[in-house]
Every structure is written in C-alpha cells, then in structure tokens.
Amino acid sequence: MSQQFPSNGVAPASSGPRVVHASQPIFFRTALAAAISLAGLNAQAQTAPADATTLPPVVVSATGYPQPLADALPGVSVITREQIEQSGAQNLTTLLQQVAGVQVTSNGGPGQSGNVYVRGFGGPDVLVLLDGVPMNAQDATGVAYLNNFTTDQIQRIEIIRGNVSAIYGSGAIGGVVLITTRAGSKKPQASISVTAGSRNTATVSANASGQVGNTALQAGVSRYTTQGVSAINPAQLSNANPNSNGYGNTTMNGSIVQTLAPGQSLGLRAFSSKGRASYDSYGVYASPTDTNLSSTSQDLYQLFSDNQLTAAWKSHLSVSQQSTTNTTENFSAYPYSGTYRTRVQQLLWRNVVQLGSGWTATGGLEWKSQGISSITGSIPSRDRQAKAAFVGLDGSVNGNEFQLNLRHDAIDGYSGQNTGYLGYGRELGGGFKAIASYSTAFNAAPLGYLYAPYFGNANLKPEKAHSAEAGLQWSQGVNVWRATLFQTKATDQWQYDFTTSTFQNIASSRTRGLELTARGAWNGWAYDANLTLQQPVNTSLPGDPTLQRRARSLANVSVNREFGAVLYGAALHYSGPRWDNGSTGKVTLGSYTTVDLTASGALSRDWSWNARVQNLFDKKYQTVYGYNREPLGVFVGLTWRPAL
C-alpha cells in the first residue's frame, strides 16, 4: 500500500508529458454515429425471441420505488443474487468492473486499497449505500472501502451511472452504488458453500432463512482467505517486501422482521465485515523485510419499519448506525501504528404515494450525525450534523414521461445546498424511447479533508457539479438496449496543494462521453454488454489533460447458456490505456483485456457445483503504477441446499 495524499483523483500539475486526445467535434461525430448504429441494431433485434423463463429486471434506485429497468430515466445497472452466483466472483469490486462506465483500481490483489470510478469520478464523488445507509468513510479518503466487501452476504447491487444528488444528497456526483444484504424468506431455506482454488484461496459460507408465524428470520456468515499476490513489482518500486500479500475476511449478516398486521412490519438488521490484509511499503525508508498490516471493520445496525398507511401511501422509517474502523500497523525500522474510526448515525423517513393515472410522488426527511475519532489520539474527534428534505414526482402523459426530484441539504459548516433532477422520456413506438435529463449536484468535504492533521483545511467549500444526458433506448421483454451521451462538469474540487500543504478548492474537471449498454436474452443465450467512450479531463490545467488513472475506453461482454445440465458462462473486460505517476514522472499503463470462464450444475437434488477460471490468458497488467494484479486462477466449489 503506497503512502499517497488522499484525493478525488484530480492529479496535481506535472511537468511530464501530457496525454494527447482527439478533438471534441470528432469525438461527438463518432458518438452520434455509434448511437445511430445502435438504433439500427435494435430494430433488427426486435425479431429475436426473449427467454420466456427470464423476468424483466426491476430497479428501485432511480426513483425510490420498484419499476421496470426499461422505465427508469437515469442510467441504472442491476446485479442480482443469481448473477452473483453465476459469476463465481468472490469480491464486490470484481462484479463492479463489469458495469458500464465503472473502472476499478487496486494496489495489488484482494483486500488491497483501491478506488472505484463511475463516469470518471471516484473516491468521495461516488456514493455507496448499504441497505440505504452511507458507507463512505469520513476520513481523508472519503471512500467506502469496497475492497473489504465479499459477495456471499450480498443479495443485490444497483449502480446509478451519473449525477443523482437530488435523490441521494451529497457525494453522488459520479453515481451511486446501492448494496442490499440478504434478507429472510417465507419458505425455509439453508445452504452451505465451500470454494477453493489458486493462491490458497478458500471461502466457506452458511446461510439460513425462514418464517415462524409472523416472524421472518435470516442469518449468514462467510469466511474468505487468500495468500494473494506480491502487491509491488520490485523492478518499478524499490525496497518492497517480495512476499505475497494475503487477505482474510469474515462477514456476518442477520435480520428479523415481525409482521404486526397486513402491510405493517418492524425489523432489525445487522451487518459486519472484518478484513485484515498485509501490504507493502517502498522507497528510501522501506526495507524488503518490512511487515505491514491493515485491518478494516465495517459494522451496520438498523431498526426499520415499513407501513402501508393507506391503499396509496407507503412509508419507510429507519434508524441506523454505521461505523468503519481502520487499524494500520508497520513493523520496520520506523514502526508506527494507528487506529481511527468514522461513523454515521442516520434517521430516514421515506414515502411513496400513488397519485393515480400513472403518477407517483415521493418525499421524505433525513437526519445524519457524522463523526471521526482516533483510538490512538492522533486525530482530534470531530462531529457534524446534516439534515435534508426531498420530494419527487414522476409519471407519464400521452407517451411523455417526466421525472422531477428536488432536495435541500443543510450541513453544519455550510450554507444550504439545493439540487435538482429533471428527466424526460418520449415513447417513439416500436419499443424505442428518447431520453434526456439535466441535474445538479454537490459534495460536502469529509471530516478528514477538513480536520486531518497537517493537510486538512476547515475552509473547504463543497464541490459543485451539473450534468446533462441525451439517449435513445430500445426495449422488448427482457431486452433493454440504450445509447447515452453524457456530460458532467465539476468545479471547486478538492486537490492537495503543494504550496500550502493542504487541500484546496483549486480543481475542476469535465467528463463527457458515450455509453452503449445492452442486456437481455436471445435464443437461449443471456447477455450483458457495454461500451464506454469518455473524455475525463482536468479543466483546471492548460490543454485539459486526461485525469490520472482514467481510461478513455472501457468495454465488457458477458454471456451464459445452458448446454445439457451445465450452465456455461464467459466474461470479457477491456480497459484502454491510462497515465499514472511513476518513479521518475508520468508513465502510461497499457491497455489490457481479461477473460473469465464459469460453469455450474447440479450433482443431485441437494448438491451443486461451480467452477471459475479467472484471467484465462494470464494477462499481466496494472491499474496503479508498480502494483501487480491477479494472474491466472482456477477455483471450484460445492454447495449443499437441503430441501426443507
């Protein structure tokens, strides 16, 4: 793990070579041509039969209540529990990198620090919610430590691509990742899974759920361990420990929901993820014999009530507490250790009212208390409160769809922040729909940016952004194809200033691009494909250079199909070249393509098997300069699901 100044990824000025990119007119002529091409392909695909056994995907994140994916005006991707199991992925970030517009970086293998970018924005500009509760830490990174999430206790993931601050508040400039943990079921269910494979990787998980009278119960636990890879390439970064950097994680999840009356329920939910990884240091003060350990604990407790107040009015009320505790231990000639904790307490009241004639109103109130403290006393304890009110209205008239969201946030230390989202869709016939939207956003600085010793700045202003999108969508049954032109401009972004040795509001950026997405089923094949062409640039520097570690092109294709009693799958991931800071200046990280293969099937009524080949062609690549990613790996597993 390199010791770097935490930032939102806007690179400081450098005398190194600047990335040369195509002019904007050429880019958008290419984008328009691709969008027209997609429309033509969609028209041809209308004759393709959909898999009758597959239900159309449903999303909640775009409006706050369930709706078909094809009806959502914001760009949304969804990953279901079934897809998680079919993928064989053991880490959340492996799933996210297959999503349109999403780019994942990592300082090594599983459990190592990293970042998730959505449409060029990363760190604190991507909001992560776990069961509706913000997970972004209030430290000097502002990230949600997604590297510490395994997949066994996750039921569903929704990713909103683009600015939706008017719905979710501060931090949603790039997008939102909404993670839902496993919940109980009426029918008794139980399972035990074991997976083992390359690099001494092993996963053991157990889950059970059911209902006793009017009480639904669920409990799950999983343990993941791996020897990992040697994170640092010694030919690029000197004095690093050459040993592999292992990682272990224990995740527990449980819930109990009591139905008090028809449409009235009260529940309690708990989640805990505790990970421990070894990481490398390098440079003059490092030694190949150094041992460094990092522990991350993420805990969430939530009491919630769901109430059908009238036939048209549904209410959700929740009280939650989330904490993230990080401990760093360095055993070297210059030893150090430290533990700090960030927390969020949230009170959320959200309402959905069916107005009739296809119109729905949403609204609610949110209160949060955010804090950061140091167990070792190196960081003064800091707290602040945030309050918000939000409303939404969406519906359709004569083939015209509308969505309006307004939100007001009042955060200690800042003036009130108002954000809005206005979306419009027009049905064109034949399954086609034109979509356009405009939205505004803000991001309040994490407490670590404001008050961290030496580089914090209590006078930081919120980041501001505004976004515009225009797209064309075709949908039929389970098939949803969309082409979207997007642009987000951000100002007052936080960047480390080497002159003042503190964070300052001195950066601005712009990301514009084209996104092509297609998912559905055809002739027995299930498919999910996407292509992102983007220009994420730093507009605060002459020549608008590309932002650090951002790729201008990303692509993913995944397919699966049953042959006999076996479900086979393949997933391809491509990332274009990116620049990063090397040992002596700017360097280019080369483009790369990885391919994963999966297979699964039943051994009997109660037993099933699965297998996964990761990085089939053993591609050597880096997403951060000097840090190795995982090579070829083979993993096999068994699952026991007894009939109850």
Image: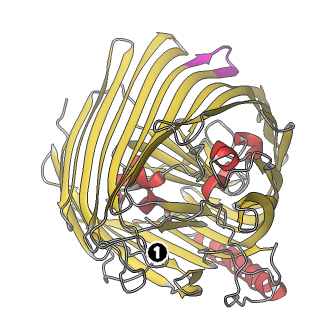
- Image point (60%, 37%), residue name: 380
Q: Position of residue 86 (x, y in %)?
A: 34, 58
**Number of numbered callouts drawn:** 1
Q: Position of residue 190 (x, y in %)?
A: 23, 34
- Nearest the viewer among 235 and 350 is 235
The three-letter code of the residue at mark 1 reads His
- Image point (49%, 74%), residue name: 624
- Image point (41%, 73%), residue name: 282
- Nearest the viewer among 585 and 367 is 585
Q: Is residue 642 left or right of residue 331?
A: left
Question: In the figure, 381 relative to 575: above or below?
Answer: above
| 141 within the magenta span | no
The N terminus sits in image quarter? bottom left
Question: In the figure, 436 relative to 33: above or below?
Answer: above
Q: What residue occupies the far left of the structure in this picture?
A: 604
Quadrant hosting residue 244? bottom left
In this rendering, does residue 489 appear at all?
no
Q: Is residue 142 left or right of residue 395?
A: left
Q: Is residue 136 left or right of residue 167?
A: left
Determine crowd level at label 1: few under 14, some 14-19, many 20+ residues with C-alpha closer than 10 A. many
The C terminus sits in image quarter? top left
Magenta span covers which residues?
305-315
Q: Position of residue 316 (x, y in %)?
A: 62, 23
Q: How is the image coloured?
A: secondary structure
The secondary structure that dominates the magenta segment is strand
Quadrant hosting residue 562? bottom left
In this rendering, does residue 272 appear at all?
yes
Helix, strand or loop for disc 1:
strand
* Residue that mark 1 sits on: 573
Question: In the figure, 82 relative to 353: above or below?
Answer: below
Q: What residue occupies the far front of the structure in this picture?
A: 333
